[in-house]
Image: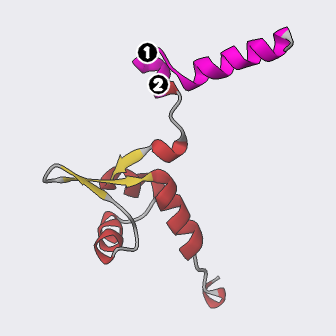
Amino acid sequence: MTSHMKRNGIINYVKAHPRTAQEAMSMETEADIWMRVPDAAAYFHVPRSRMYDLIQKGALPAVRIGERSIRVNRKEVERFLAENRRIDPGAV
């Protein structure tokens, strides 16, 4: 085993085993980002009522935190919008 392989093994171990909460937080990916519905609606320029309708119909996955807070995953919203975008050729 070369010293390069040893060094890469150590780096990979450290990346996979963060020692502090700050290191763990910095390892989050975009898939880990959960947003409140009003924040997601503003971020994606979608009416808040439309977001709640999609959640209620089951078209957009969401989780309830406590009694009043609902969160959506940013990647799931992006996926939904990409799969369901429609432009009426006559409207352009």
Residue 20 badge: 1
Q: Nearer the viewer, residue 29 or 14?
A: 14
Residue sticking out furthest to the left: 67
Horizontal side of residue 49 vs 23, given as left or right: left
> Residue 24's mark?
2
Label 1 SS: loop
Q: What is the spatial separation of the Cα atoms under label 2 and label 1, in whole angstroms?
A: 6 Å
| Quadrant of the image containing the N terminus | top right
Q: Amino acid at mark 2?
A: Ala
x, y percent for residue 83: 58, 72
Q: Work out which residue is located at the far bottom of the displayed protein and give it.
A: 90
> Where residue 48 appears, x then y in whole percent?
32, 63
Quadrant location, the C terminus: bottom right
Q: Tell me where the magenta segment starts and ends, as one range.
A: 3-25
* Main secondary structure found in the magenta portion: helix
Q: Is residue 56 left or right of residue 32?
A: left
Q: Counting other residues with Cα less than 10 Å from the Cα at mark 1, is it few (<14), some (14-19), or many (20 or more)?
A: few
Locate residue 91, reporting x and y percent: 60, 86
Which mark, by number, is residue 67? none
Q: Position of residue 20 (x, y in %)?
A: 43, 15
Q: Circle 2 — which element?
A: helix
